[in-house]
Amino acid sequence: MPDQPHSVAPAAQPALRKSLGVLDGVAIAASSTAATTSIGIGLGVTAGVVGLHLPAIMLLAFLPILGIAGAYSRLNRVEPNAGNGYVWVGRSLTPWLGFMVGWVNIVAVVAFLAYTTAVTGSALLQLAGDAGLHRVGGLALDPGSTAQTTAVGILVLVAVTLTAVTGIRTAARLQAGLLVFEYVVLLGFCGYGIVTGPHDFSLSWFDPFAIPSATALAQGMLLSVFCYWGFESAFSVNEEVRDPRDASRAGITTLFTMLALFLLGSLAFQRALSEQELVGHGAEGLAFFGERLASQPWAALPLVALMFSAVASLQAGVIPTARAMFAMSRDRTLGPVWSKVSPRYGTPAAGTLLIGALAAVVAALALVIPRLADMIMATVSAVGIVVALSYALTAVAAAVRFRSLLREDWREGIRAVVLPALSAATLLGLGGYLGWSFYTSADHFEVSADNGWFLLFTPVAMIASGFVAAAWARWVRRSPYFRTGKGTDADAPSLLVPSP
């Protein structure tokens, strides 16, 4: 029966420490989704594509994501695993696609950490400017400079990585505290903006058919999917929650909370700012929004909230990625260093430190794109495509795994099979259409956020590297994962034994 858990064996080593509840899962998932960062930066980027139809695109993107969340929740119920999609897709479809899902999620998070590092540095430099500090030595501080923001952000990345090493419970408590401040500020300013904004409310804001073109709709959808990305972080710590059902509750709760916040932020920004102002301020959109609604020092509060959100999302990005690599290392598809658990903290400490270091290196490589806004646009477009692919494959895995429910209970079959399959088809269609539009929009390659070939090359390189890494794991590491398609968890140690 598809809803029956797998039989269990003696406990495996290494094992993660079970110390989390549902609220801890919400804190981790909400921090990873980073609503304040998505509102402060993502809304301006998305408005540049869809115009003043942010509420429409946020609602439209929520529908397939809800189907994806249902797939994650049902799969987690029968097989909680730190590798989640990597294990579920490998078991239900093929180990090659399972490995690729795990790999592209890791690569996508590292890219996300790289740009969030720069966003964090930008927020700090903007705060320094508000405090009257505009120069250090002979250097003029510029919150729009990728070089300066990355340098400052890397210092913060080092600090949050060290905090993540010391224990996930400590990290979750830190994130919960940051979230409370963020949401109080966000609700206050957005509510005030909706009430007092000079621009008239329009029902056309909710009309997806008014979006300029099919390409704009596809790109806007993927940008919005990127904004929701992160709710599944609750499932990455499902071996560290006391009850696996808490991971599902945390993921679904986070997703609906994000929808409410994105709609609130969309309405507030469009009431307070013109389309030109919303699009033109990009990475500094939330700071401009705060200045429009209040004078200093109150105007700095949204910027402080953005900084807290970026810091929390840095840490929340490090945590699930280290767990995904822990799960893959446990299957010997990655090297053994990623599955080493600290006896003192009960966390994959070495892997966590390595993820932070890798993100810092990639953040430094992003200096080839000098403007922060361009770097964000290029990264978000690439990550949006690979995240859509990862979500879609996980939903297909759920539909395949629970397909017998279509015969046994048609209502459950619709929820477990039909809705995930439709969500997967939607995301695959959007990703394919957007990739084609990128390909046909340019006739040469250039490292630029408005060059279609560059925007297409980045996600293709991410996906292709996954198959190269899978081939290495299959034929060089000789991981038994590729023979069985079954990933290990805390109750199934069989793949930890080297194959003959």
Image (cartoon, helix red, strand yellow):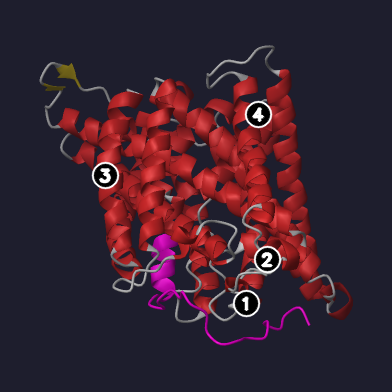
Viewer-nearest residue: 268 or 235: 235
Mark seen at residue 494: 1
Sequence-wise, which precedes: disc 1 or disc 4?
4
Query: Which residue is pictured at 49% across the width and 81% down the height?
Result: 243
**Residue 409 falls in which quadrant of the image?**
bottom right
Mark seen at residue 326: none
**Around disc 4, counting alpha carbons within 10 Å, would you say few (fewer than 14), some (14 to 19), or many (20 or more)?**
some
Sequence-wise, which precedes: disc 1 or disc 3?
3
Q: Closer to the camera: disc 4 or disc 2?
A: 2
Residue identified by numbered label 2: 480
Q: What SS does tag 1 mark?
A: helix
Q: Main secondary structure of the magenta part?
A: loop
Viewer-nearest residue: 362 or 138: 362
Disc 2 from disc 1: Cα separation: 9 Å
Disc 3 from disc 4: Cα separation: 35 Å
Considering the image in quadrants, where does the N terminus appear? bottom right
Q: Which amino acid does label 1 sit on?
A: Ser
Sequence-wise, which precedes: disc 2 or disc 1?
2
Residue identified by numbered label 3: 156
Start-end of magenta stretch: 1-29
Query: Which residue is pictured at 83% across the width and 70% down the height?
Result: 403
Sequence-wise, which precedes: disc 3 or disc 4?
3
Residue 385 as seen in the image, left or right of residue 1: left
Q: Are marks 1 and 4 in contact (CB under 8 Å)?
A: no
Query: Which residue is pictured at 73% across the width and 19% down the height?
Result: 440
Disc 4 from disc 2: Cα separation: 44 Å
> Residue 118, how many percent across, how many down?
35, 34
Q: Which amino acid does label 3 sit on?
A: Val
Mark seen at residue 216: 4
> Residue 145, how many percent across, how many down?
32, 23
Q: Closer to the camera: disc 3 or disc 2?
A: 2
